[in-house]
Amino acid sequence: MTEPFIIYALKVDQPIGEFYIGSVSAEELDKISYVDVREFQKGKADSIAGIQRKLSKSRVKDINKYVNYDYASFPTSIVVAVDERCADIVPSEKTFGLYKITISPFEDTEEPSNSIPIGRAAKILDGQHRLAGLQTHNGKKQFDLNLSMFIGIDIDDQAEIFSTVNQAQTKVNKSLVLDLYDYQKSKSTYRSAHYVAVSLDADSASPLHEKIKRIGIAHPERDKNSETLSQATVVRGLLRHYPGDPEEEKNKGKREQSNVPLRNESWKNTIFCEFYRADDTSSIYKIVKNYFDAVAKKWPSVWYDNHATFILNRTNGYNALIRFLRDCYLHALANEETTRVVPQAEFFLIFEKIDLKAADFHSDNYKPGSSGSAQLYKDLVKSAPF
């Protein structure tokens, strides 16, 4: 791109200085921008320069996938610092309050090494992963970006902006994110699993009644020790038994294609798939409730113990048990060709033959983390009557 890039933008005044906001296509922005990665300088062992972190390939891969979903959105700005030698700013003749900003290459005839090609006119301060991820956008729908342009700002202010944008961000609690599926109208595995988790917590007859911490914070009217599981943990465990990738299924729901099974989809691989495709979340709930009813009946003393000494009703225990659900379900339906709701009594026939004792579920035996839950799962399988 050698031709000037023109954008019409609004001016914003803030304590750090003025900047301009406008709309630009990802393709156009990619042609005028670059990333200045902070790293050791070659040949200068004690010299470090640059601002940005290195590009994360895994994050770019995730964004590559996300940008082609029907619900893809980047409502927050890409932030760039434009070299003032490349920018010409004049009030717009078209609309009052807008500025016409023309970005062009800068040519220094006296010192050619100081020249700036248009591809290095704008340094990205925030948004490099979004821009890199958009390189695979299929173009079915236009994908414009919000652009915030700081023109002619010093390197110290550039560093301040990068630090503020990235350090000040607080990750949203995953339980809160999942709870927002209450508002979603289209079908998705996220929404179905959320409803199952909420029902398990709300139903007074459920073995998980008031054991699930909704929206990531303790319920103000409950015993703070009773909520031994986070909503995110419960939902993530349930999702392992739903079909497909949750984001892909969400996109199918937006397109009203969520009842179409995946190629070679089978309930023997993902035990909830037929119920989900048939919009039968109620049966999924009954299976999960019946299963944990059997768990609670087998080991009542530790299942209803709300202290951290025993792990059965906590993250490690739940993760192992929800994984073990598939083994138990397939055992119960070993000679059957169609799926069904397995009653508590059938699940209990399995658990009553497992020789693990209540005292075995002590936190000393199953350490916090994935290794502890993996070990418990192995012990359950090893002791099971199949």
Image (cartoon, rainbow, N blue to C red):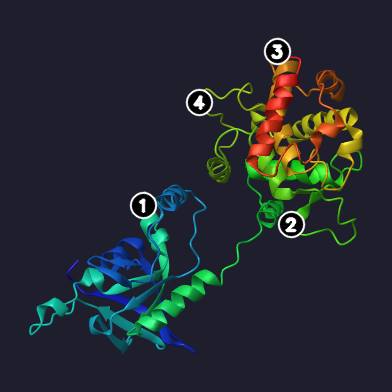
For marks 3 and 4 on the same chain, the one whose residue lies earlier in the sequence = 4
* Residue count near mark 3 (Cα–Cα under 10 Å), binned few <14, some 14–19, many ≥20: few
State yes or no: discs 1 and 3 in contact (Cβ < 8 Å).
Answer: no
State yes or no: discs 2 and 1 in contact (Cβ < 8 Å).
Answer: no
The Cα–Cα distance between marks 1 and 3, rounded to whole angstroms, is 47 Å
Q: The disc labelled 1 sits on which kind of residue?
A: Gly
Left or right of residue 131: residue 305: right
Q: The disc labelled 2 sits on which kind of residue?
A: Ile
Q: Position of residue 23 (x, y in %)?
A: 39, 71
Q: Which residue is mark 2?
A: 215
Q: The disc labelled 3 sits on which kind of residue?
A: Ala
Q: Position of residue 163 (x, y in %)?
A: 48, 74
Of 122 and 313, which appears nearest the observer?
Answer: 313
User: Could you tell me which secondary element the residue under label 2 belongs to?
Assistant: helix
Q: The disc labelled 4 sits on which kind of residue?
A: Arg
For marks 2 and 1 on the same chain, the one whose residue lies earlier in the sequence = 1
For marks 4 and 1 on the same chain, the one whose residue lies earlier in the sequence = 1
Q: Is residue 57 above or below residue 272?
A: below
User: Could you tell me which secondary element the residue under label 4 belongs to?
Assistant: loop
User: Could you tell me which secondary element the residue under label 3 belongs to?
Assistant: loop
Q: Position of residue 69 (x, y in %)?
A: 48, 48
Question: Which of the 4 image quadrants contains residue 257?
Answer: top right
Can residue 280 be spotted in the picture?
no
Q: Which residue is mark 4?
A: 263
Residue 306 numbered mark, or none: none
Residue 139 numbered mark, or none: 1
